[in-house]
């Protein structure tokens, strides 16, 4: 008959801070020693929780604000040169796009409601986030325009010819309203206005999908820089007729601010009520440009184009199942 030898010792649990007294094979007496077996980590700060919850909105707000600060500030600085000699450079203003993309990387750098809309359709971006992104982009653009106006108010007074004079293109040769938003050339028809914005927006979305497509060449970390060249090219080749707004937030936000600052109802009436064109055409243009890219080039399964019936079956499937369920 063999004897069972009991071993007495201590076992320290490094994770919990507890110590156990070992009395044998199946016997263990645990007791607490310092430090106690509780989580001493402080609770997250209130602002940290709010920031984590609202980071996408903050990112789009500041990204769009940066876009307006650089784009609008550049137009205002060179406004007198444009009036006298019509000579200018797009690089400073379009460079604001690159900086805005860097600033809003946490939210995927949409900075354009039409881009968010196309991503909801073709890349599975949550539709519930669309109003949050769109409102944040609009408010960011309005804030950027208000900052530029406050900084350059004295210069605007000089350019307009007085502190109480604010004019709109088509109503004055020295109008400064065009600093904040786009106005069409006088010879443009309503159809021409719409098609110009539609075409520029389609090219923009086509190129964004191309630059983000790892199955194609892709741009990777150089995406902000390549987007700068895309915007520069669109402005140089398609910007003369309407000013290439291609962004509801970038155009409507500053237009609304200019109206509130005293530019009058002409901001809505100019160009035969042109104001609605940059609000509608970019959505249709970006959706069309994204559709063209996915139909002919994109092979990713996240696009509805690469599902049965180009997404129509997936769209109608759940609804058909609900109708067949008697509950």
Image: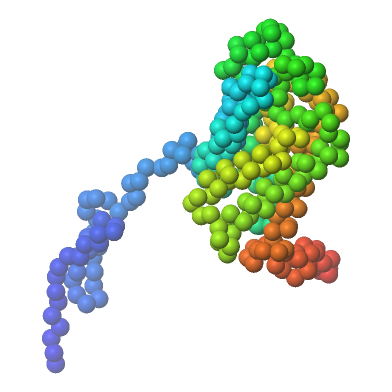
Q: Nearer the viewer, residue 88 or 326?
A: 88
- Does any portion of residue 72 appear in the rendered image? no
Residue at 63% in and 27% down: 87
Quadrant position of the C terminus in the picture: bottom right
Q: Is residue 284 left or right of residue 51?
A: right
Q: Quadrant of residue 270?
A: top right
Q: Is residue 120 left or right of residue 25?
A: right
Q: How is the image coloured?
A: rainbow
Residue at 78% in and 31% down: 184
Q: Position of residue 71 (x, y in %)?
A: 60, 31
Q: Quadrant of residue 176?
A: top right
Q: Nearer the viewer, residue 151 or 232?
A: 232
In the rendered image, the vertical position of residue 210 relative to residue 152, given as above or below:
below
Q: Position of residue 235 (x, y in %)?
A: 66, 39
Q: Position of residue 236 (x, y in %)?
A: 66, 39
Q: Quadrant of residue 197?
A: top right
């Amino acid at each position: 008959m063999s004897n069972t030898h009991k071993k007495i010792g201590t076992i320290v649990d490094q994770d919990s801070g507890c110590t156990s007294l070992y009395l044998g094979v199946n016997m263990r007496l645990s007791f607490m020693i310092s430090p106690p077996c509780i989580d001493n980590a402080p609770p997250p700060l209130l602002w940290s929780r709010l920031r984590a919850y609202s980071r996408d909105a903050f990112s789009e707000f500041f990204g769009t604000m940066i876009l307006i600060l650089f784009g609008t500030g550049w137009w205002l600085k060179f406004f007198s040169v444009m009036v006298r000699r019509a000579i200018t450079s797009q690089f400073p203003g379009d460079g604001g796009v690159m900086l805005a993309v860097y600033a809003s990387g946490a939210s995927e750098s949409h900075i354009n409601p039409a881009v968010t809309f196309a991503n909801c359709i073709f890349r599975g971006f949550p539709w519930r986030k669309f109003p949050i992104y769109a409102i944040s982009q609009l408010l960011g653009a309005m804030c950027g325009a208000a900052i530029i106006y406050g900084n350059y108010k004295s210069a605007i007074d000089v350019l307009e010819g007085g502190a109480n004079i604010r004019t709109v293109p088509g109503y004055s040769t020295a109008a400064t309203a065009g600093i904040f938003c786009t106005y069409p050339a006088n010879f443009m028809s309503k159809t021409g206005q719409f098609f110009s914005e539609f075409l520029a927006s389609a090219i923009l979305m086509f190129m964004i999908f191309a630059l983000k497509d790892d199955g194609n060449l892709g741009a990777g970390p150089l995406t902000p820089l390549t987007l700068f060249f895309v915007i520069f090219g669109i402005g140089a080749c398609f910007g003369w007729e309407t000013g290439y707004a291609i962004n509801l937030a970038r155009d409507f936000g500053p237009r609304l601010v200019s109206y509130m600052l005293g530019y009058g109802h002409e901001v809505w009436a100019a160009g035969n009520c042109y104001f609605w064109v940059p609000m509608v055409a970019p959505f249709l243009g970006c959706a069309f440009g994204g559709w063209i890219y996915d139909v002919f080039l994109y092979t990713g399964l996240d696009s509805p184009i690469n599902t049965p019936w180009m997404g129509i079956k997936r769209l109608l499937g759940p609804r058909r199942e609900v109708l067949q369920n008697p509950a």
